[in-house]
C-alpha cells in the first residue's frame, strides 16, 4: 500500500485510478475530435484543450470516488463496478453541464459531453476487465510471511483470502511448541536459516502474529531481514494498514503511545478544518433552508409534536451539547427510557422513515457545525446515557472524544448502521483510526464517500 497523507491506499487502486485518468482524458479528446469533425470545426492543438480535458477527468473521477467505484466490492465484481460506473459518469456529466451553464463557457458542449460519456463508459469498463484483472492477480500482490500459527495467523489468513486484498501469504512459521491452528504452518525448528528462507520465497514483508511475544521474538533473524530490505511489521499495525481500523482485540496502551499517529502538529489542519466548517455549514444552511422548511411542514402534518428534535450528545473532551434534527420518531418513542434504534423501528413515523434514508433529518445539525460544537467530519456524537456504559465495556472509548464529533465520519462510510455493544465496538475501531490518522485528505475522502452512503441508503435505519 501507498501511504498518502497518513492514509493507506492500495497500489491497485492507485494504478487503476491513474489508468482511469488517462482514459478519461482520451475519451474527452476523442469526443471533441468526433464533434469537431461533424460540424466542420478545426481540431486545433491538443494542448489548448488540456485544461478542459483535465476538468472533465477530475469531475468524473471525483464522482467515481464518491459512489464507491474504487471500493472493495467494485474491485472484485464487474457487475457491481459497472453499475457504480454508470451512476458516477452520469453524475459527473450532470455536474459538468451545470458548470458549463453557470460559467457560460464553450468547453463542455452537450453533444461533446454525450460522446465523452459513452466513450468513458466503454473505456473504463474495458480498463477494469483488462488492467483490473491483472492487478488482482497474485503475481502483483505483496508477498507476506507470517510468523505465528495461532488465532492471529488464522485471522490474517482469512483477510488474505479476500479478493480485494493487496497481499498474498506465502507461508506460516510456527514459533512455539503449541499445536498450530494453521495446519500448513512450518515449525521454526525445521528451518535452518530463516533469513535465507525468506529470501528464497521472495518475501517483501514479515508480519509478527505471535500470541505471546515474551521470549518468543527471533530478534537476530528479524534484524537480518530488516537490514536485507524486508519490511517487518507487527500484527496490529498490519491490520490497521490493511483494514483502515484499529484492532481492539490486540492493541494495548503502549502500542497506541509508540505507534505513529495522534500528531500534535495539527494547528494548521485544525484551522483549515474550522474555516471549511464555517463556510460549508453557512452555505449548506442557506441552500437547504427550503428543503428543511418543506420537510418540517411534512413532519408536522404526519404526526403530532414539535418539528425539531433536540437531544443531548457528548462532544469534544466529553462536554455535552444539544443536537437539533428533524423529528423522525413518535413523541412517545422513549417513554420506557433511552434505547438503541433497530431495523424497521416501529417508533419511526412514515415521513421519518424517508428522511432518515436520505439523511434529510441530519440537515439541521449544520447549525451545530456553524457554532463549533460539531464538525462535518468526525466520530458520531453518542448520547450520555450510553457513553458511561460504553466506556466501561469498550477499551479506549474515551479517546474518541479527543476529536470533535461530526455529521459524517470514517465509521459511517465503512460500517453499516449498528445499534448494539458489538456494533459500537466495530465503529470505535474506525473512529480510533480516524483520530489517530486525521488529515484534511482523509476528511475529503470521507465527505466524498458520504455520497455513496446517501445514494444507496447504506447505514440508514
Image (cartoon, helix red, strand yellow):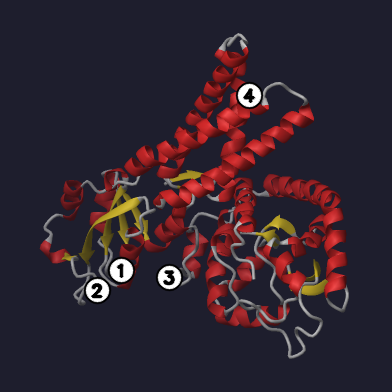
Q: Which residue does the numbered mark 4 point to in the structure image?
A: 52
How much space separates mark 2 and mark 1, taking CA atoms? 7 Å
Mark 1 = which residue?
Answer: 154
- Residue, disc 2: 181
Residue 119 lies, in percent from the top left, at 51, 31
Mark 2 surroundings within 10 Å by alpha-carbon count, few (fewer than 14), some (14 through 19), many (20 or more): some
Side of 150 where 378 appears, left or right = right
Q: Is residue 284 found left or right of 86 in the rendered image?
A: right
Q: Position of residue 60 (x, y in %)?
A: 58, 37
Q: Nearer the viewer, mark 3 or mark 1?
A: 1
CB contact under 8 Å: marks 2 and 1: yes
Quadrant containing the C terminus in the rendered view = bottom right
Q: Earlier in the sequence, mark 2 or mark 3?
A: 2
The correct choice, above or below, for 162 with respect to 81 in the image is below
For the point 73% across and 35% down, which residue is it? 98
Residue at coordinates 72% horizontally, 77% vertically from top-left?
348
Foreground mark, 2 or 3, reads 2
> Are there few (<14), some (14-19), or many (20+) residues within 10 Å of tag 1?
some
Q: Earlier in the sequence, mark 2 or mark 1?
A: 1
**Is disc 3 placed on a helix, strand or loop?**
loop
Mark sitting on residue 250: 3
Closer to viewer: mark 4 or mark 2 = 4
Is residue 234 shown above or below 113? Answer: below
**Alpha carbon of mark 3 to alpha carbon of mark 1: how far?**
14 Å
| Circle nearer the N terminus (3, 1) | 1
In the rendered image, which quarter is residue 412 located in? bottom right
- In terms of sequence position, does the residue under pointer 4 or pointer 1 come before the other? 4
| Front position in the image: 373 or 282 | 282
Marks 4 and 1, how far apart in space? 50 Å
Query: Furthest residue to the front?
Result: 38
Is there any visible trace of residue 435 in the rendered image?
A: no
Amino acid at each position: 500500500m501507498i501511504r498518502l497523507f497518513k492514509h493507506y491506499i492500495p497500489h491497485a487502486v492507485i494504478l487503476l485510478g491513474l489508468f482511469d485518468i488517462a482514459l478519461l482524458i482520451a475519451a474527452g479528446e476523442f469526443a471533441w475530435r468526433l464533434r469537431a469533425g461533424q460540424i466542420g470545426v478545426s481540431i486545433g492543438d491538443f494542448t489548448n484543450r488540456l485544461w478542459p480535458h483535465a476538468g472533465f477527468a477530475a469531475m468524473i473521477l471525483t464522482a467515481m470516488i464518491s459512489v464507491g467505484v474504487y471500493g472493495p466490492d467494485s474491485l472484485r465484481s464487474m457487475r457491481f463496478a459497472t453499475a457504480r460506473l454508470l451512476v458516477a459518469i452520469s453524475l459527473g456529466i450532470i455536474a459538468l453541464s451545470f458548470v458549463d451553464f453557470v460559467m457560460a463557457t464553450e468547453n463542455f458542449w452537450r453533444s461533446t459531453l454525450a460522446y465523452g460519456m459513452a466513450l468513458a463508459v466503454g473505456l473504463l469498463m474495458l480498463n477494469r476487465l483488462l488492467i483490473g484483472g491483472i492487478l488482482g492477480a497474485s503475481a502483483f500482490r505483496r508477498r507476506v510471511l507470517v510468523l505465528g500459527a495461532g488465532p492471529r495467523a488464522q485471522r490474517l489468513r482469512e483477510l488474505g483470502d479476500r479478493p480485494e486484498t493487496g497481499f498474498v501469504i506465502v507461508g506460516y512459521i510456527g514459533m512455539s511448541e503449541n499445536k498450530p491452528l494453521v495446519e500448513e504452518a512450518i515449525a521454526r525448528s525445521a528451518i535452518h536459516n530463516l533469513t535465507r528462507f525468506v529470501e528464497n520465497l521472495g518475501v517483501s514483508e514479515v508480519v509478527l502474529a505471535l500470541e505471546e511475544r515474551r521470549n518468543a521474538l527471533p530478534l537476530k533473524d528479524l534484524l537480518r531481514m530488516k537490514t536485507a530490505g524486508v519490511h517487518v511489521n507487527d500484527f496490529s499495525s498490519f491490520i490497521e494498514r490493511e483494514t483502515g481500523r484499529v484492532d481492539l482485540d490486540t492493541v494495548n496502551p503502549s502500542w497506541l503511545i509508540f505507534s505513529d499517529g495522534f500528531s500534535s502538529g495539527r494547528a494548521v489542519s485544525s484551522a483549515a478544518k474550522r474555516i471549511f466548517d464555517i463556510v460549508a455549514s453557512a452555505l449548506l444552511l442557506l441552500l437547504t433552508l427550503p428543503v428543511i422548511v418543506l420537510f418540517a411542514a411534512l413532519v408536522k402534518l404526519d404526526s403530532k409534536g414539535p418539528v425539531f428534535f433536540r437531544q443531548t450528545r457528548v462532544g469534544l473532551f466529553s462536554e455535552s451539547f444539544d443536537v437539533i434534527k428533524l423529528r423522525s420518531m413518535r413523541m412517545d418513542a422513549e417513554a420506557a427510557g433511552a434505547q438503541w434504534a433497530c431495523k424497521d423501528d416501529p417508533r419511526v413515523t412514515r415521513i421519518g422513515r424517508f428522511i432518515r434514508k436520505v439523511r434529510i433529518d441530519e440537515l439541521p445539525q449544520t447549525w451545530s457545525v456553524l457554532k463549533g460544537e460539531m464538525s462535518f467530519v468526525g466520530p458520531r456524537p453518542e448520547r450520555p446515557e450510553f457513553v458511561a456504559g460504553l466506556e466501561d465495556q469498550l477499551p479506549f472509548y474515551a479517546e474518541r472524544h479527543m476529536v470533535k464529533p461530526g455529521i459524517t465520519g470514517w465509521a459511517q462510510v465503512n460500517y453499516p448502521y449498528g445499534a448494539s455493544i458489538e456494533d459500537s465496538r466495530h465503529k470505535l475501531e474506525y473512529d480510533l483510526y480516524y483520530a489517530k490518522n486525521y488529515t484534511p485528505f482523509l476528511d475529503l475522502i470521507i465527505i466524498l464517500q458520504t455520497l455513496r452512503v446517501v445514494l444507496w441508503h447504506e447505514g440508514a435505519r
